[in-house]
Image (cartoon, helix red, strand yellow):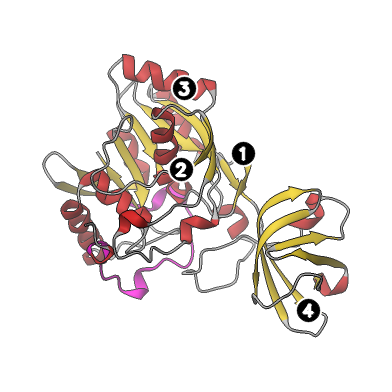
Amino acid sequence: MLKLSDFDYHLPRELIAQYPLKERDEARLLVLERKNAKIEHRIFKDIGDYFNRGDLVVLNDTKVLPSRIKGSRITGGKVEVLLLNRKEGLTFNALIKPARVKPGEKIIFNGGTASGIMSAKNEITFNLKDIEAVYNLGVMPLPPYIKREAESLDNIYYQTVYADKEGAVASPTAGLHFTKRLLENMGVSGVNIAYLTLHVGIGTFKPVKCKNITEHKMEPEYFKVPDRAAGLIRDTRVNKKRIFAVGTTSLRALESYAAGKKEGYTDLFIYPGYEFKIVDSLLTNFHLPCTTLFMLVCAFCGEKLAKKAYQEAVDKKYRFYSYGDAMLII
């Protein structure tokens, strides 16, 4: 049995990054070599040293929407709405706090200039002109471990520089470290870049509650591997070069593609024992203990090695989680 407690580790609270670095590529980079268990400490902008001509770097081009909206009930009580996805028109599936808000209730936004009706449980319909007007009410949906309100800087820094396809409620954070210049330099060096889409859903924050982790069910997330990316993947394999997944989302999309699906919903849960079919290296941030994300990292490099690297990161006072530093596993 794979016990949940096996994926725990201690992290001092002060290492949880609350703000991004001004320069994205100045983050620290822990490089972990699986073959010899060697650890190096670098700066992210040096990541090109680990790519060879013909290697393929795969990025998730999902775009985070400003989906957290604050409002109030007619009675004056505060309400927070997190838009998950649009059903039709201006009706959205959403997480509503407090949960006691009932269907049929009216929610007031922006000092009374906008409103919505709870059209069903976990569903809201806005009385506005268009979808743009809805998202104009919102702010970036920062993760719960960032203990502050979203600010204007988050509109820039909680989004990758290559974000394109709208639909995520959380950022694919491993990609936050790339700059346009860094990507251009990679291209000049003969490194191929492919874009796929996986819309990160609220399930990324869903806690694992099963003592036996194999009983945990993942929330399905939409993904698509375009034809161009599929061609680059094929060519990379034929030429016996490496495929680098940027982030756990890119990795899950790639492994879902390797299982025979180019587009749709994936609920692929990767934990130790999983046999990787397509990904050779993983770039990722440092993840919360006892999460499916940390379990994926343990599957990729082994529990013992993953915990060794995380302990090293703690000892060296790396910055953790979404706005934190990065780890490259090769």
Assess disc 2: are there few (<14), some (14-19) or many (≥20) residues with their C-alpha within 10 Å of its C-alpha.
many
- Toward which corner of the image does residue 46 lie, by quadrant? top left
Residue at the location (34% across, 46% down)? 270
Task: Depth check: give the residue in front, 20 or 22.
Answer: 20
Q: Name the residue under label 3.
A: 230
Which mark sits nearer the N-terminus, 2 or 3? 2
Three-letter code for the amino acid on which mark 4 is drawn: Arg
In this orientation, which residue lies closer to the viewer: 257 or 119?
Answer: 119
Q: Mark 2 points at which residue?
A: 178
The quadrant of the picture occupied by the N terminus is bottom left
Q: Can residue 21 be seen in this view?
A: no
In this figure, which residue is indicated by the disc labeled 1?
164
User: Disc 1 marks which amino acid?
Assistant: Asp
Counting residues from the start of the chain, the first of labels 4 and 3 encountered is 4
Do the residues bearing badges 4 and 3 touch, measured as CB atoms within 8 Å? no
Q: Which residue lies furthest to the left in this view?
A: 36
Real-space Cα distance between discs 1 and 4?
34 Å
**x%, y% of residue 49?**
29, 34
Q: Give the range drawn in magenta.
A: 6-29
Instruction: Decide: is 232 above or below 276.
Output: above
Residue linked to disc 4: 73
Q: Are marks 4 and 2 in contact (CB under 8 Å)?
A: no
